[in-house]
Image (cartoon, rainbow, N blue to C red):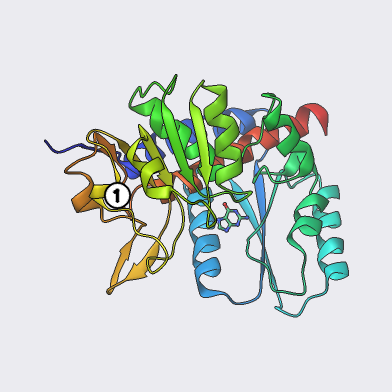
């Protein structure tokens, strides 16, 4: 039996269609949703991600403001740019593309963003709200994964979910979102001892390692009918792949995400959704 492909492109398009309508409604109220992006340095992958985010904004009618900064910018200079974007009433969402060069501190930078404009859900305020089931702005990749479960009516209650990632952008927000749906969540990482056994007992595996020489999720490591969400994207043997080989995994899984065309498009779609949420929040509370 072959499992069902979780079609990230199709689900992302359905999110974008809804966002486009919401943008029109906001514009009718004289609110022009605007996302400011900040890209520091010349990391080619980050530049591509930001370019894709701009293109997606354009598709749904969200205005973008592009800030490309030199790789040697100081923390003080970056803080000042964020402060100005916080004050700018025409800007509703602020996204600082990560990772940052070594001289810049990720926590200091993301904490500086106004929680009302925090479309990545990374400020301590929004992370706290998420832990208390009150979040309006949640990190895009985790909320995109939840959207995928909902699209296929996948009930999470009582499911054993193994997360293979503990980052602020993926693993930690997912932990809270899954717990809210009554899943039993195990968060694994590089020091986890019995990863293979944990994977083998999981109903759902969400993996985001991104280094094939350290970790590859093979069919032997999943149980028959498991659901596999592969967040990673990396170049391996001349191909773009995730932590698993989709063609092999789908023969044993009940559902799985391909790479590319799985989680990636959802991250961008949820950024658009967060931007219109931020535009509404700013107009009500800003
Ligand atoms: N780098 C990789 N993924 C992300 C993301 O979702 N947001 C930001 N700001 N940077 C990233």
Quarter placement of the N terminus: top left
Residue 258 rendering spot, x and y as whole percentages: 29, 49
Q: Is residue 135 above or below residue 187?
A: above
- Crowd rating for badge 1 (residues with CA inside 10 Å; few <14, some 14–19, many 20+): many
Q: In this view, does 39 lie above or below 42?
A: above
In the displayed structure image, the side of residue 233 where residue 181 appears, left or right: right
Residue 135 rendering spot, x and y as whole percentages: 68, 29
User: Farthest residue toward the bottom?
Assistant: 72
Identify which residue, 280 or 129, lies in the foreground. Answer: 129
In the displayed structure image, the side of residue 162 where residue 252 appears, left or right: left
Q: Quadrant of residue 96?
A: bottom right
Dividing the image into four quarters, tell me where ligand 1 lies: bottom right
Residue 271 rendering spot, x and y as whole percentages: 56, 44
Q: In this view, does 153 lie above or below 223?
A: above
For the point 76% across and 34% down, the residue is 282
Q: From the image, tell me which residue sits under label 1.
A: 258
């Amino acid at each position: 039996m072959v499992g069902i492909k979780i079609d990230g492109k199709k689900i992302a398009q359905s999110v974008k269609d809804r966002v486009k309508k919401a943008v029109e409604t906001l514009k009718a109220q004289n609110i022009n949703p605007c996302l400011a992006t900040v890209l520091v340095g010349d990391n080619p992958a980050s530049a591509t991600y930001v370019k894709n985010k701009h293109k997606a904004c354009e598709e749904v009618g969200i205005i973008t403001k592009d800030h490309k900064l030199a790789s040697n910018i100081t923390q003080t200079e970056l803080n000042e740019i964020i402060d100005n974007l916080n004050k700018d009433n025409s800007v509703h969402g602020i996204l600082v593309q990560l990772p940052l060069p070594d001289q810049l501190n990720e926590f200091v930078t993301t904490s500086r963003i106004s929680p009302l404009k925090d479309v990545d859900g990374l400020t301590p305020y929004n992370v706290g709200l998420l832990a208390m089931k009150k979040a309006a702005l949640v990190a895009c990749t985790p909320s995109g994964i939840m959207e995928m479960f909902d699209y296929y009516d996948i009930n999470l209650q009582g499911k054993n979910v193994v997360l293979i990632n503990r980052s602020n952008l993926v693993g930690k927000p997912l932990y809270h979102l899954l717990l809210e749906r009554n899943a039993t969540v195990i968060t694994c990482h590089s020091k986890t001892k019995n990863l293979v056994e944990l994977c083998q007992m999981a109903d759902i595996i969400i993996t985001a390692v991104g280094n094939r020489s350290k970790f590859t999720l093979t069919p032997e490591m999943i149980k028959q009918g498991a659901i596999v969400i592969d967040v990673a994207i990396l170049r391996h043997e001349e191909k773009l792949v995730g932590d698993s080989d989709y063609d092999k995994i789908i023969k044993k899984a009940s559902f799985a995400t391909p790479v590319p065309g799985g989680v990636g498009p959802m991250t961008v779609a949820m950024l658009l959704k967060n931007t219109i949420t931020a535009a509404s929040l700013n107009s009500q509370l800003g």
